[in-house]
């Protein structure tokens, strides 16, 4: 950073404080001014020291030293301090720019991956716009948070494709008054979407590490209608049954009778059922007085663990 002629003039006239104030507004950015109580330029005291203690480099200026050296040292100190201040501004700008990029990416995801593929439930679309998927991913994957596909979250588990989260939420036909059981908390992303769409969400996760991680993230979001438990979701959550909706977010080899028994008379179970490599998204309900199944296309989920999961 180069001081301007007007700043040098102030410097040579002994107006040290003005010189600092003029140098790119640094003093207004929080740099403490030097102690300028002794200004008489005609009485330079060789032993008098003015310390710029808060400036990077801890520059020490002596009034009795040649003015050219004083100028050079002060210029260096101010330059270093300004560069540090500027770096902080750049970091803040980069963080803000990244946040805007992620918001734009989330909007593109809703339009291109959901609306254009036929997701029509406006409440589901609003939830997908509102819930930030990158919050449920490691920092190194934030740039890919709104890609069209699943992403790893550790322990051989994944966060589901955004379209699949939206599709399962739409198939559940939530109006905002339901009590929902989710089997497989995983990253917590689907849980957060359900919390926006339903009155209460009870979610069970078999993996203790994923359970703890999801709990931290969901608590940080202030979701007061989410209740979590670590355990085998095959048995459901009997003490909180019945549920209007039970959603299973891992591949099941067959229908778990224990879960069907925890549905309300008009309740429905939404789950990927089939082989370990390929499943079909199924909705099972008893609203007509007998069990009926509806199918919503092929899908791929990680295998369910526990009593109702795939054998090891």
Image (spheres, grey):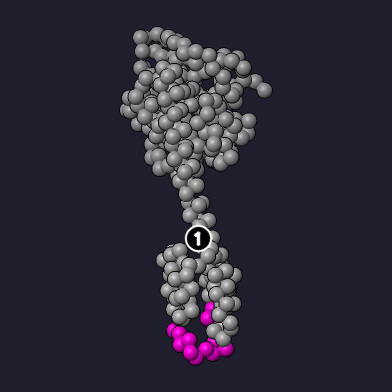
For image coordinates 42% across by 19% down, the residue present is: 116
Residue 50: within the magenta? Answer: yes
Task: Give the number of marks.
Answer: 1
Q: Tell me the magenta residue range.
A: 34-51
At which x and y percent is residue 200?
38, 32
Residue 45 falls in image quadrant: bottom right
Classify mark 1: helix, strand or loop.
Answer: helix
Q: Is residue 62 above or below residue 20?
A: below
Q: Is residue 2 visible?
A: yes
Q: What residue would you read off at disc 1? A: 85
Q: Residues within 10 Å of mark 1 (few under 14, many from 20)?
A: some
Residue 176: within the magenta? Answer: no
At which x and y percent is residue 251?
56, 20
For image coordinates 58% across by 73% down, the residue present is: 73
In the image, 20 versus 241, the foreground residue is 20
**In the current view of this chain or complex, which residue is farthest to the front?**
5
Q: Is residue 121 left or right of residue 209?
A: left
Name the dominant secondary structure of the magenta segment: loop
At which x and y percent is residue 167?
44, 20
* On-image quarter of the C terminus: top right
């Amino acid at each position: 950073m180069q001081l301007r002629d007007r700043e040098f003039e102030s410097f040579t006239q002994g107006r040290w404080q003005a010189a600092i104030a003029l140098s790119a507004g640094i003093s207004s950015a929080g740099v403490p001014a030097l102690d300028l109580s002794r200004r008489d330029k005609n009485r330079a005291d060789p032993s008098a020291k003015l310390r710029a203690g808060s400036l990077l480099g801890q520059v020490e200026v002596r009034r009795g030293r040649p003015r050219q050296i004083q100028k050079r040292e002060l210029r260096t100190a101010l330059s270093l301090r300004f560069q540090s201040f500027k770096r902080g501004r750049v970091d803040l700008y980069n963080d803000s720019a990244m946040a805007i990029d992620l918001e734009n990416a989330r909007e593109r995801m809703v339009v291109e991956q959901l609306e254009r593929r036929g997701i029509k439930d406006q409440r589901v679309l609003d939830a997908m716009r509102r819930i930030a998927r990158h919050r449920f991913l490691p920092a190194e994957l934030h740039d890919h948070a709104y890609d069209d596909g699943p992403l790893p979250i550790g322990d051989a588990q994944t966060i589901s494709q955004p379209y699949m989260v939206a599709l399962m939420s739409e198939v559940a036909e939530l109006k905002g008054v339901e009590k929902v059981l989710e089997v497989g908390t995983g990253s917590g992303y689907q849980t957060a979407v359900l919390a926006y769409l339903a009155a209460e969400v009870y979610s069970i996760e078999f993996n203790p590490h994923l359970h703890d991680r999801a709990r931290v993230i969901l608590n940080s979001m202030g979701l007061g209608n989410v209740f979590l438990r670590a355990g085998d979701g095959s048995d459901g959550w009997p003490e909180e049954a019945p549920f209007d909706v039970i959603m299973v977010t891992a591949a099941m080899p067959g229908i778990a009778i224990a879960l069907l028994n925890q549905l309300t008379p008009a309740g429905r179970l939404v789950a990927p059922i089939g082989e370990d490599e390929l499943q079909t998204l199924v909705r099972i309900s008893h609203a007509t007085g007998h069990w009926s199944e509806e199918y919503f296309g092929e899908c791929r989920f990680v295998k369910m663990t526990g009593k109702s999961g795939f054998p090891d």
